[in-house]
Amino acid sequence: ERTVHHLIANGFDPKTHPDPYNILIYTSFQERATRISHGNVGRIARQQGDDSLARICGIIAGDEARHETFYTRMMTEVLDQDPAGGILAFRDVIRGIIAMPGRLMADGGEPDLFDRFAVVPQRLGVYTVGDYASIIQHLVATWDIAGRRVSGAAADAQDEVTFRLNWYLSGWMAPFYYGLEQGFYKDEGIDLTISEGRGSGVAVQIIGAKSDTFGFADVSTLILAVAKDVQLESRPALPGRGQRAQDVVGCLDGDLPPGHDQTQRP
């Protein structure tokens, strides 16, 4: 109860202002995510013999599914009427990490309460990085983002190369941005956009779902992802720091820009 009141007091900004298309994209994602998570909690509750909680979660998941259908259909209509504007809005929203309102949960004591809380649903399979990636892939397919006939900036957004970092922006990531500023990527015919990450696990799942072209991740996470049939390839990039394994750039199988060497699976 305390965390709920702190969350209400803190408020939440999904960073969708001022474009109304953005809020339709965000809610389409968010409603699907909450449908999945409540459905999974209900499944676990039923396995543990709590039929009442399972029914409650099922009802909530059903409500979220109806919300998802509404917002997804609304955005489909937007894309039918204004495909260029819709694709550009989708690009802008997906460039970042879509955060849930619970990000600002607090109990007045622990400053990292959400980070500790988020580990539990990830471990139990309630809501995972794989779910995050699958939702993006679902929206790309449902809205036919790649297949819509557009020109100019929207067409560029369909074809641009995206690079997902493994964490928030920090000093040691400066070389990637230096190369962008100096035009090194453009000289190689690459229209690159760099986005922050939330860990190597998130990065490899997003890349595996074809939501980003390349990513940056530690090799152990990459190996685990490939072992679970996530389609990735890799190239050594930077030496390890301390006890960490070597970091690699991961990319989708067969999706390297033309003229660039294919790399080997780890």
Image: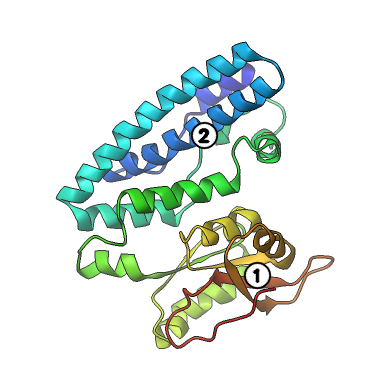
Residue 55 image point, x, y percent? 55, 15
Q: Is residue 18 left or right of residue 218?
A: left
Q: Foreground: 80 or 176?
A: 80
Q: Residue furthest top?
A: 52
Residue 212 image point, x, y percent? 47, 63
Residue 216 image point, x, y percent? 61, 67
Q: Residues within 10 Å of mark 1 (few under 14, many from 20)?
A: few
| Image: 45 above or below 35 | above
Question: As shown in the figure, which amino acid type bears the numbered disc 1?
Answer: Trp
Q: Residues within 10 Å of mark 2 (few under 14, many from 20)?
A: many
Residue at numbered disc 2: 36
| Image: 58 above or below 235 | above
Q: Foreground: 233 or 9?
A: 233
Q: CA distance from mark 1 to mark 2?
A: 36 Å
Q: Residue at x 51, y 51 (%)?
A: 133
Q: Is residue 13 visible?
A: no
- Point out which mark residue 188 bears: none
Q: Quadrant of the N terminus?
A: top right
| Image: 105 above or below 50 | below
Considering the numbered disc 1 on the image, is that residue within a helix, a strand or a loop?
Answer: helix
Q: Are marks 1 and 2 in contact (CB under 8 Å)?
A: no
Residue at numbered disc 1: 172
Q: Residue at x 66, y 59 (%)?
A: 225
Q: Residue at x 42, y 33 (%)?
A: 31
Residue 90 image point, x, y percent? 34, 53
Q: Is residue 12 left or right of residue 104?
A: left
**Number of marks in picture:** 2
Q: Residue at x 78, y 69 (%)?
A: 241
